[in-house]
Image: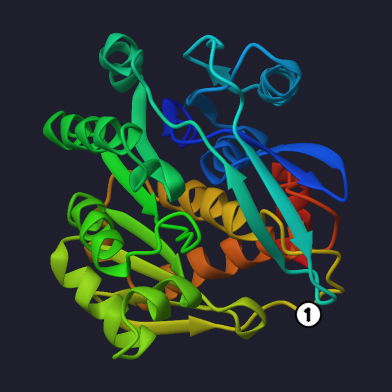
Amino acid sequence: MSADPRAGGVLVIGEALVDVVDGTPHPGGSPLNVAVGLARLGHAASFVGRFGRDEFGDLIARHLRDNGVRSLLPADAQPTSVALATLAPDGSATYQFELVWELPGLPQVLPAALRDARLLHTGSIATVLHPGAASALAAVERARAEGVRVSFDPNCRPSITPDAERARAAVEAFVALSDLVKASDEDLRWLYPDRSVEESAQEWRRLGPGLVVVTRGSQGAFAASAAGLIAVPARPVAVADTVGAGDSFMAALIDGVLELGERGLGELTASEVEGLLARAGAAASLTVGRPGADPPTRPELDAALSR
């Protein structure tokens, strides 16, 4: 009998925050959403992020617990981070942030967390906002040294890091240490306005990752891989909103990579890459079809893929 590809854990490092949409609070933050998405797909997900000993922090802690995600750091005395979200008529969201990002407890929990992990995922605000960004980078460097795979999603927020040159340098440091990278076309256009998103994805792959995936909203997604540039269309869906869609895509992409076992991502065939993109795209389509960051369970994703 072959080993369960979901055996072993996934460690997610990054921000947890509360999205306030039309006055209603919802637990969120890109890395937290990825951790929840992975847990719903059957993975042992551990989360390293911070939140306060306050009402919003209690909401985040309960959300992690209810979804089977193990939170490795206790609540602290700082206020929980908040994103005030505004939805456009097409369901897309823009944010204003009130953030605290630091991880003084990470060095104590990291060694044991990495021993249990098959993959470490990070990204978003956590990798560009100091002082916590330095802690996240050090964790990724240690993961690489210990042979743990790394995935990364920059999920750029120009309102938080308006200096594109500095953000570019920070992002590229993580890209170079990653096996798997996912970004949106908006991320790449902001970071590299003078070249196409396809060129940017290929340049990132030259930095080290075996696979670089770019999401393009209603236009689907493509990957820069050893098999070339491979694209898949988006699934047709009635959009409730786009909150958390990229995070659901990322969680399903990681899930698909782990299902492939220990093969290097630079060895994947075109059909394997297409399969990964289709799987991740199906997860994203389920999320945009319902309000908020609500990633699918494994039965929901399997059912969508069978249709």
Q: Is residue 222 left or right of residue 136?
A: right
- The residue located at (29%, 22%) in the rendering is 114
Q: Residue at x 17, y 36 (%)?
A: 141
Q: Give the residue type at disc 1.
A: Pro
Residue 262: x %, y % from top left: 29, 44
In this picture, residue 181 sits left or right of residue 234? left
For label 1, the SS is: loop
- Mark 1 packing: few (<14 Cα in 10 Å), some, or many (20+)? few
Residue at which label 1 appears: 236
* Up/down of 230 relative to 2, above or below: below
Pinpoint residue 18: horizontal percent, then vertical percent.
Answer: 69, 36
Instruction: Return the residue nearer the eye: 83 or 300.
Output: 83
Q: Position of residue 237 (x, y in %)?
A: 82, 74
- Left or right position of 158 against 134: right
Say if residue 283 shows up in the picture: yes
- Tell me if I can see residue 259 in this picture: no
